[in-house]
Amino acid sequence: MERLLFCVKLQREAPGLVKPPYPGPLGQKIFADVSAEAWALWLKQQTMFINEYRLNLLDVTAREFLNKEMQKFLFENDESSKPAGFVEPSSAS
């Protein structure tokens, strides 16, 4: 059975995640308040950050940066910052 919740990112009711996607209290908050669709949007944004900034996820500073951007993206209704000169890839025709 699908779990519905009011998504703080999308500002509408939507299907929730199956399990917390992140450890600890923050993971529980995401599980309770963020839809699966919004989480997928964050994963796309996170991938852009990793690629554009060439982040090394073994680096604590890089993980802290992603954590901060994730919280801004999901809970502050902030699309978070895009890297300077970033251009959205066009869809292949």
Image (cartoon, grey):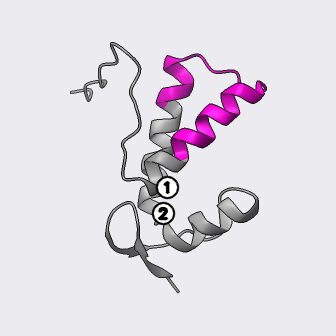
Q: What element carries label 2?
A: helix
Q: Up-down: is 50 above or below 78?
A: above
* Quadrant placement of the C terminus: top left
Q: Is mark 1 on a helix, strand or loop?
A: helix
Question: Which stretch appears magenta?
Answer: 48-70
**Label for residue 31?**
none
Mark 2 sits on what residue? 36
- The residue shown at (41%, 66%) is 8
Residue 79: x percent and y percent? 36, 42
Q: Up-down: is 34 above or below 87?
A: below
Q: Is 64 in the magenta?
A: yes
Mark 1 sits on what residue? 39
Q: Identity of the amino acid at label 2?
A: Ala
Assess whether mark 2 and mark 1 are in contact (beta carbons under 8 angstroms): yes
Q: Residue furthest left?
A: 93
| Camera sees residue 77 | yes
Q: Nearer the viewer, residue 62 or 46?
A: 62
Q: Is 18 in the magenta?
A: no
- Asked if residue 6 lies left or right of residue 90, the reply is right
- The residue shown at (52%, 39%) is 69
Give the spatial CA distance, label 1 vs label 2.
5 Å
- The residue shown at (55%, 68%) is 17
Residue 40: x percent and y percent? 47, 51
| Camera sees residue 20 | no
Residue 61: x percent and y percent? 71, 26
